[in-house]
Image (tube, rainbow, N blue to C red):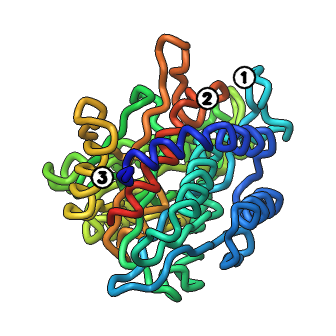
């Protein structure tokens, strides 16, 4: 009798053409966060064609399906995000995006196609399943407040109760054929900082008649570096960066009335995270007071840090070694990028791992969030098969 691993390997090969077709359709037809209506219709229709009857919508464009029967343990949730990015694709592939200024530059088309592939494999193995598996096609990973938070509020972890969550993400630096894991702290929290400094503009040749917001902004940027260097514990990775500074008005000989800044704050300690918010505002308030300017500060609380449950992640890594061989499973470093899968990790034991999609020989090396991002589609075979293998063994 064929064992489950070999059967899933065989099915991932048998369904490979379908998975590629689904991925290419999704890549051609990307939709932005909270607007994934056609994408959700495609997912729902595909699931029903595969044979799923327990399919429902959540958070408008989320699609949820279940398979298996209730056992002693809670269900395992398999998650794929479905939204695209506001990026104009530069690739000239036959599946290039048809939607102007919108592209699956973060691989969510891959995640969705892999989960559909896993769904088809699991349907074939339905009679052998022990317990329930919940398929979560989640909208809006790329934009606050994050589709994961909305699904959780609407009860995605209930009915049936989910006892653990699993997600996978493309990783161009990792060669196709490999999977990567990191137990414990893995990805940072991410908060957005919006700051306006208001002074008194005027002629640049008469600086004694103005209150220069540019000088104050410069002082604030420098002073805020102490949040990391003199306030954060050296044991807690922390990042505070500003990526945008704009003035309202201004010229070579005109000092503007106000300056707007936008930045990001990231860390791995939730308690320190909110302490840092207070320090950031105190530094801004005191600097503005010293120079006679006013300020408006909005710190938008974003995704929390992502914690990979050590037991679940080590078990997933063991299963990956069983499925692909030890030479194809790697340990991942800590990352200060962020992911809204983190919301699940604060609710139930979770594992978020990486799917190798790069191929130097084929020239497939572009990072995510770039105009030339693409994958070696052989990754689809592995992504779909391993998700199914993981689901039936956890």
Give the quarter of the figure containing the C terminus.
Answer: bottom left
Disc 1 is placed on an element classified as loop
Q: Position of residue 321 (x, y in %)?
A: 26, 42
Disc 2 is placed on an element classified as loop
Task: Answer with mark 2 or mark 3, whichever residue precedes in sequence.
Answer: 3
Query: Is residue 361 among the parts visible in the rendering?
Result: yes
Mark 1 in CB contact with mark 2 (< 8 angstroms): yes
Q: Residues within 10 Å of mark 2 (few under 14, many from 20)?
A: many
Q: Is residue 335 left or right of residue 91?
A: left
Q: Residues within 10 Å of mark 3 (few under 14, many from 20)?
A: many
Residue bearing mark 3: 186
Residue bearing mark 2: 374
Q: Look at the picture and state if 135 lies above or below 188.
A: below
Q: Position of residue 365 (x, y in %)?
A: 51, 21
Residue found at the far top of this picture:
361
Query: Is residue 285 among the parts visible in the rendering?
Result: no
Q: Residue at x 26, y 71 (%)?
A: 271
Foreground residue among 356 and 97? 356
Q: Which mark is residue 91?
A: 1
Q: Image quadrant of residue 190?
A: bottom left
Q: Look at the picture and state if 275 lies above or below 335.
A: below
- Rounded to the nearest whole Å, what is the CA distance between mark 1 and mark 2? 8 Å
């Amino acid at each position: 009798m064929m064992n489950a691993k070999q059967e899933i390997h065989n099915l991932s090969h048998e369904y490979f053409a379908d998975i590629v077709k689904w991925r290419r359709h999704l890549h051609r037809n990307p939709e932005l966060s909270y607007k994934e209506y056609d994408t959700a219709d495609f997912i729902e229709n595909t699931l029903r064609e595969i044979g799923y009857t327990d399919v429902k919508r959540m958070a408008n464009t989320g699609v949820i399906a279940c398979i298996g029967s209730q056992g002693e343990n809670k269900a395992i949730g398999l998650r794929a995000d479905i939204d695209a990015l506001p990026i104009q694709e530069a690739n000239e592939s036959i599946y290039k995006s048809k939607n102007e200024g919108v592209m699956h530059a973060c691989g969510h088309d891959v995640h969705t196609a892999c989960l559909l592939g896993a769904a088809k494999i699991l349907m074939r193995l339905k009679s052998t399943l022990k317990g329930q598996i919940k398929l979560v096609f989640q909208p809006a990973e790329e934009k606050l407040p994050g589709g994961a938070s909305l699904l959780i509020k609407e009860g995605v972890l209930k009915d049936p109760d989910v006892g653990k969550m699993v997600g996978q993400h493309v990783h161009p630096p990792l060669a196709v054929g490999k999977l990567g894991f990191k137990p414990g702290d893995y990805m940072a929290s991410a908060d957005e900082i919006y700051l306006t400094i208001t002074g008194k503009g005027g002629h640049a040749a008469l600086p004694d008649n103005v209150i220069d917001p540019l000088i104050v902004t410069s002082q604030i940027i420098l002073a805020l570096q102490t949040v990391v260097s003199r306030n954060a514990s050296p044991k807690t990775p922390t990042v505070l960066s500003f990526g945008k500074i704009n003035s309202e008005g201004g010229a070579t000989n005109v000092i503007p009335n106000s300056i707007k800044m936008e930045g990001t704050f990231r860390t791995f300690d939730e308690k320190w995270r909110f302490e840092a918010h207070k320090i950031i505002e105190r530094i801004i308030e005191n600097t503005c007071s010293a120079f006679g300017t006013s300020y408006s500060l909005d710190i938008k609380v974003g995704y929390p840090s992502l914690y990979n449950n050590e037991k679940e992640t080590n078990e997933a890594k063991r299963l990956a070694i069983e499925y692909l061989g030890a030479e194809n499973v790697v340990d991942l470093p800590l990352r200060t990028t962020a992911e809204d899968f983190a919301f699940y990790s604060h609710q139930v034991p979770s594992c978020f791992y990486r799917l190798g999609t790069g191929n130097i020989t084929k020239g497939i090396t572009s990072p995510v969030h770039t105009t030339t991002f693409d994958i070696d589609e052989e990754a689809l075979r592995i992504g779909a098969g391993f998700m199914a293998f993981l689901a039936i063994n956890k």
